[in-house]
Image: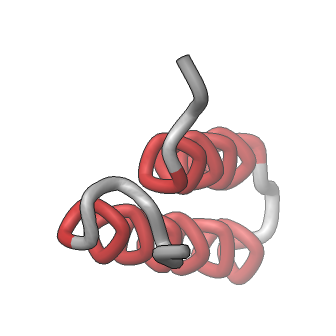
Amino acid sequence: MAETDAERFRKEAEDCRHLAEKAISPLDKEAWLRLAADWLKLAQDAESRGGRWFRT
């Protein structure tokens, strides 16, 4: 089964959270966590559209 956009966005958010855990600089950690939050927002938006970001 093909991965939905929402699933892909959630994986991107998880990757950002892992990078935040490894960040040495507090500024880098904050930036990674902001990116993770943005990816999660995209996932939620995609889910409200049926799992896909764009409908064709």
Q: Is residue 28 left or right of residue 3?
A: right
As drawn, 46 above or below 50: below
Q: Is residue 24 left or right of residue 53?
A: right
The image shows residue 36 at horizontal and vertical percentages of 52, 64
Q: Residue at x 79, y 69 (%)?
A: 25
Closer to us: 8 or 28: 8
Q: Quadrant of the N terminus?
A: top right
Q: Residue at x 76, y 74 (%)?
A: 28
Residue projecting furthest to the front: 56
As drawn, 46 above or below 3: below
Closer to us: 23 or 16: 16
State the image quarter where residue 18 is shown. top right
As drawn, 42 above or below 47: below
Residue projecting furthest to the left: 48
State the image quarter where residue 46 is shown. bottom left
Closer to us: 47 or 33: 47
Please state the total of marks drawn on the protein image.
Answer: 0
The image shows residue 5 at horizontal and vertical percentages of 53, 54
Closer to us: 19 or 38: 38
State the image quarter where residue 56 is shown. bottom right
Q: Residue at x 77, y 54 (%)?
A: 23
Q: Residue at x 47, y 41 (%)?
A: 7
